[in-house]
């Protein structure tokens, strides 16, 4: 009945579009009258171009910092600060701190709405390295690390619930987790990846993740202290020893890139893309042995054969009732198994195991609070916390999640409730 209703609505929409077209289409008579009126109208004589003096041509409203634009105001201040002598800089410091704080909300919004623009409008490293610590503390965080990229795909009810269709988080090796915004090639890659090079800028727990896996160091920038520096070009094998030892600013003729864990000096700028391609290919797998189904590594969950599912009813610490009866859960799994059996023409069989209810160590509010950077927990990704704790509880009950292709949690409330989510490539489901 639902399918028929949906098809009926589609037919009605298609019909309405056709009717709307004819209703909105002007008649031939109206077009003829409009054409005559246009031909009878007095001709428009273009006004002669008056060339302005050069001094006026160079002045543009866009070049003047807008009073209402905190980004432009800070950029203007930073130029004034760097141009001032040491005796004058002390007097500019208080204003600089205020302007740096004022740009934070704007920059956070740019990260969320246009991550590519956020990366472009970040304070250049050559400027950042010359600013006092009080100012740098208020600027966006520069992120260059390795970490896990988690992508959650929302269920069809997300539109009704007002939730996003996709959620992304990055957890770095240094222990920080960011709500993540992407663009370009990454925008159309919905797979979770266990080890990626994280290059970007962050503010208030929100990260604009660069499409590139490397960042080219700016001329005059001092390479980051504490990172391993490679002075043998990995593409050509040539030695790129510099004349002066670090920390030395990068010369304009030097090609240096920063990855998640290294600074690499290349012998040729054309080698940047070649080296980055290797990093991109390295993100495709875990590094362990894999089977192949053609040109690319196979998925973590098979598309033929037997798929083993571990279905775990989870109860939060402040709950006492299970999210559903065993009969209801088994019936839903049976319908799912029948669907895949039919659609695969008998080549895919789903075998499910339903565990006894497991108790999660935290209450609903704790998991929900991890999904807001303005919350009391100051962390993000409650979905991953739920999954981690449920796996630990299931293993303690005698069900090792590593023996299954798919791990499914069913709960009432908690992170991102009531929308369901799945993680492509990792075999994880939240219901």
Image (cartoon, grey):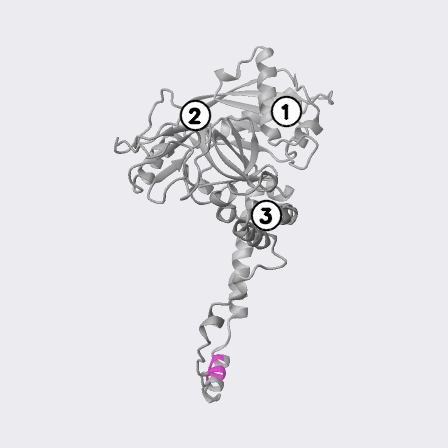
Between tags 2 and 3, which lies in front? 3
- Mark on residue 300? 2
Of 32 and 102, which appears nearest the observer? 102
Read off the magenta span: 31-35
N-terminal label among 2 and 3: 3
- Mark on residue 88? none
Q: Is residue 1 something one can see in this rendering?
A: no
Q: Position of residue 237 (x, y in %)?
A: 26, 30
Q: Secondary structure at mark 2?
A: loop
Is residue 271 toward the left or the right of residue 74 in the image? left
Q: Position of residue 67 (x, y in %)?
A: 63, 59
Q: Is residue 221 above or below residue 414?
A: below
Find disc 3 in the rendering and name its residue. Answer: 87
Q: Quarter of the image holding residue 326?
A: top right
Q: Secondary structure at mark 1?
A: helix
Q: Position of residue 12 (x, y in %)?
A: 56, 56
Disc 2: CA contacts within 10 A as few (<14), some (14-19) or many (>=20): some
């Amino acid at each position: 009945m639902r399918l028929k209703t949906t098809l009926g609505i589609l037919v009605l929409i298609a019909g309405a579009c056709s009717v709307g077209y004819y209703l909105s289409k002007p008649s031939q008579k109206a077009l003829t009258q409009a054409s005559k009126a246009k031909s009878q109208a007095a001709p428009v004589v273009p006004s002669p171009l008056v060339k302005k003096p050069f001094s006026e041509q160079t002045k543009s409203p866009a070049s003047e910092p807008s009073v209402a634009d905190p980004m432009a105001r800070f950029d203007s201040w930073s130029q004034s600060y760097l141009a001032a002598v040491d005796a004058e800089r002390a007097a500019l410091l208080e204003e600089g701190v205020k302007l740096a704080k004022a740009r934070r909300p704007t920059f956070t919004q740019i990260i969320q709405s246009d991550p590519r623009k956020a990366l472009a409008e970040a304070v250049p490293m050559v400027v950042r390295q010359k600013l006092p610590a009080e100012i740098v503390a208020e600027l966006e965080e520069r992120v260059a690390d390795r970490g896990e990229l988690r992508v959650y795909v929302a269920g069809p009810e997300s539109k009704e619930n007002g939730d996003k269709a996709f959620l992304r988080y990055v957890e770095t090796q240094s222990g920080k987790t960011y709500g993540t915004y992407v663009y370009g090639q990454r925008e159309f890659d919905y797979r979770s990846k266990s080890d990626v090079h994280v290059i970007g800028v962050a503010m208030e727990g929100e990260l604009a993740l660069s499409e590139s896996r490397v960042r080219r160091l700016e001329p005059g920038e001092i390479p980051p202290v504490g990172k391993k520096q490679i002075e043998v070009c990995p593409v050509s094998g040539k030695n790129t020893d510099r004349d002066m030892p670090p920390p030395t600013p990068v010369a304009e003729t030097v090609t240096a890139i920063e990855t998640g864990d290294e600074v690499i000096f290349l012998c040729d700028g054309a080698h940047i893309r070649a080296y980055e391609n290797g990093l991109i290919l390295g993100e495709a797998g875990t590094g362990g042995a894999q089977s192949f189904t053609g040109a690319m590594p196979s998925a973590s969950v098979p598309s033929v054969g037997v798929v083993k599912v571990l279905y775990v009813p989870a109860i939060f610490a402040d709950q006492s009732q299970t999210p559903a009866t065993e009969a209801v859960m088994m019936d839903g799994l049976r319908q799912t198994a029948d669907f895949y059996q039919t659609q695969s023409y008998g080549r895919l069989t789903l075998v499910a195991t339903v565990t006894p209810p497991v108790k999660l160590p935290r209450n609903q509010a704790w998991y929900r609070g991890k999904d807001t950077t303005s919350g009391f927990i100051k962390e993000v990704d409650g979905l991953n916390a739920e999954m981690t704790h449920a796996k630990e509880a299931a293993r303690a009950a005698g069900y090792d999640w590593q023996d299954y292709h798919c791990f499914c949690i069913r709960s009432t409330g908690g992170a991102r409730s009531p929308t369901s989510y799945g993680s492509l490539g990792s075999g994880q489901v939240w219901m």
